[in-house]
Amino acid sequence: MVTTILSILLLSVPLFSTSLSTSPLHESTMSMEPSEMETLFKVMELISSDRDWRVTNPDPCSPHSSWPGLECKPSSDNPNLFHVSRLNFGTPPNPTCKPTSTFPSLVFTLPSLQSLFFFNCFTHTNTTLSLPPHLPSSPNLRQLSLKSNQALMGPIPPQISSLKSLHTLTLSQNNLHGKIPTELSTLSSLLHLDLSYNSLTGFIHGGIGGLRSLLVMDLSYNSLSGPIPASIGELGLLQKLDLSSNLLSGEIPASLSSLGYLSFLALSNNSFKGGFPGGLTKLQNLQYFIMDDNPMFVTLPSELGSLSRLQELRLANSGYSGPIPESFGSLSKLTTLSLQNNRLTGGIPEELGGLSHIYHLNLSKNMLNGVVPFNESFMRRLGRSLDLSGNPGLCVNGEDGFEGAKAGIGVCGNSRNNGTVVMQGLPLKSSCAPVLLSNLLLVLLGSLSMF
Ligand SMILES: *[C@@H]1O[C@H](CO)[C@@H](O)[C@H](O)[C@H]1NC(C)=O
Ligand SMILES: *[C@@H]1O[C@H](CO)[C@@H](O)[C@H](O)[C@H]1NC(C)=O
Ligand SMILES: *[C@@H]1O[C@H](CO)[C@@H](O)[C@H](O)[C@H]1NC(C)=O
Ligand SMILES: *[C@@H]1O[C@H](CO)[C@@H](O)[C@H](O)[C@H]1NC(C)=O
Ligand SMILES: *[C@@H]1O[C@H](CO)[C@@H](O)[C@H](O)[C@H]1NC(C)=O
């Protein structure tokens, strides 16, 4: 498409006419500044051996140059002069990277570069992300994406904060180490920050609150430690926050509840503990709340039931005790509820059986008891995506036996459940008594009918 645009532009302007006496170009056949072209060739020679770029593409921005992964734009003050605006390396049809390629900091001296992508490029020769020390760096760079470069190591350089126009900074799936530079928080135009799947360490600095325009922050799969800074609440436009699989600890800060646009929140696989902030109900746009694998050891807050847009609620493997709040039955958009591997007690609230969009419900490995309150059509709809196994005190009524077996539990009063229901029932709180009693009755009736 760009080539087409270029062709139209080139056809419609007298590019090579000698009347261009005011052109700063030394050779009338060239559409680029010679110094910019030389930088481009040097970058290409550092990265790619796909072809001899100087020979095959002497005029890179000409529509006939067929240079993959390259886009040019005409200069704003001279439509006959072209600048490199986008470079894309690593996956065909873009230029591929040779095994000896190292990060070309020179690339940041291209004056009009807007987007730069290196995907699966630095894979063999250890290299670091660096910017040229003194020159002003690509003042127009909006998008920098370095992804899946296993040999890209070392720290994120503080100088990255000199790329003032950055909207998107993706440094995912590299081998970056060290702390997130505090200078990063001066990138006030940043909308999208993805540093996931590296080996970053240290605290999340409070200055991160300075990224006022941020919509997406993904710091997952690193080794960041310490608490979530309270200043997170200053990222008032944030829609997605993923801090999962780090070493973060402490409680969820109350300020998180001021992120009113948040629709995706993932905090899984950290060391968060203790209660949820009271204001959590303010997150009325939250659709995904994913917080498995944390040593929370509290009861489940019934306030979660007022997050009416929730589609996925995952709170598995986190030491939650007490009952499943009935209010979870009001989450009418819920498709996935994962509460497995906790210490939940009491009966399954019958309100859950009214969740008409749910297709994945895992309550396995808890201490739930009583008769499963779901009707057959509900259980058939979920099929094997309903997991109730590992709750010795749960059982289904006889007519639901087939569906119950798929969900991992037996029929009330069957020999498979005998004893265990009664045994589980005894030490529990009195609030569970009616369910337990009726269960006990069923067991008794069941064993009587056997004779
Ligand atoms: C590249 O880095 C890795 C990981 O730090 C290291 O094990 C390896 O020895 C380095 N290779 C060279 C050639 O320096
Ligand atoms: C948990 O986080 C650690 C640290 O990032 C990671 O190595 C591990 O794979 C994660 N575990 C899961 C189950 O995602
Ligand atoms: C099963 O329960 C759901 C939710 O309570 C209800 O809408 C549906 O009509 C019930 N189906 C049958 C066959 O009873
Ligand atoms: C439910 O969770 C358990 C424990 O993590 C897991 O083994 C099982 O596969 C899950 N069940 C379903 C249906 O996903
Ligand atoms: C069920 O009860 C019978 C009779 O008390 C006993 O022999 C059997 O082992 C019990 N089965 C289970 C699974 O507990």
Image (cartoon, grey):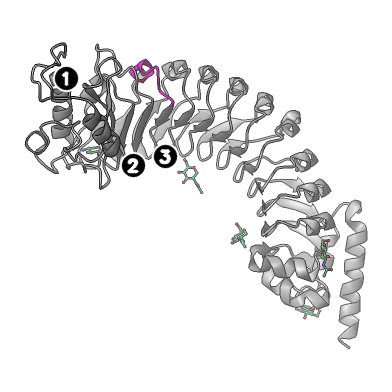
Q: Secondary structure at mark 2?
A: loop
Residue 46 horizontal side relative to residue 239, left or right: left
Give the residue at x 17% y 23%: 32
Marks 2 and 3: which is nearer the front? 2
**As drawn, 269 above or below 423:** above
**Dots 2 and 3: beta carbons under 8 Å?**
no
The label on residue 33 is 1
Determine the CA span between mark 1 and mark 3. Answer: 39 Å
Q: Position of residue 253 (x, y in %)?
A: 65, 26
Give the residue at x 46% y 39%: 221
Which residue does the numbered mark 2 point to in the structure image?
148
Label 3: few (<14), some (14–19) or many (≥20) C-alpha neighbours in 10 Å: many
Which residue does the numbered mark 3 point to in the structure image?
197
Q: Quadrant of the C terminus?
A: bottom right
Give the quadrant of residue 233: top right
Q: Position of residue 11 (x, y in %)?
A: 22, 32
**Dots 1 and 3: beta carbons under 8 Å?**
no
Q: Amino acid at mark 3?
A: Tyr
Asked if disc 3 is less than 8 Å from ligand 2, the answer is: no
Marks 1 and 3: which is nearer the front? 1
Asked if disc 2 is less than 8 Å from ligand 1, the answer is: no
Q: Which residues are magenta?
A: 159-167
Res 139 seen here? yes
Q: Earlier in the sequence, mark 1 or mark 2?
A: 1
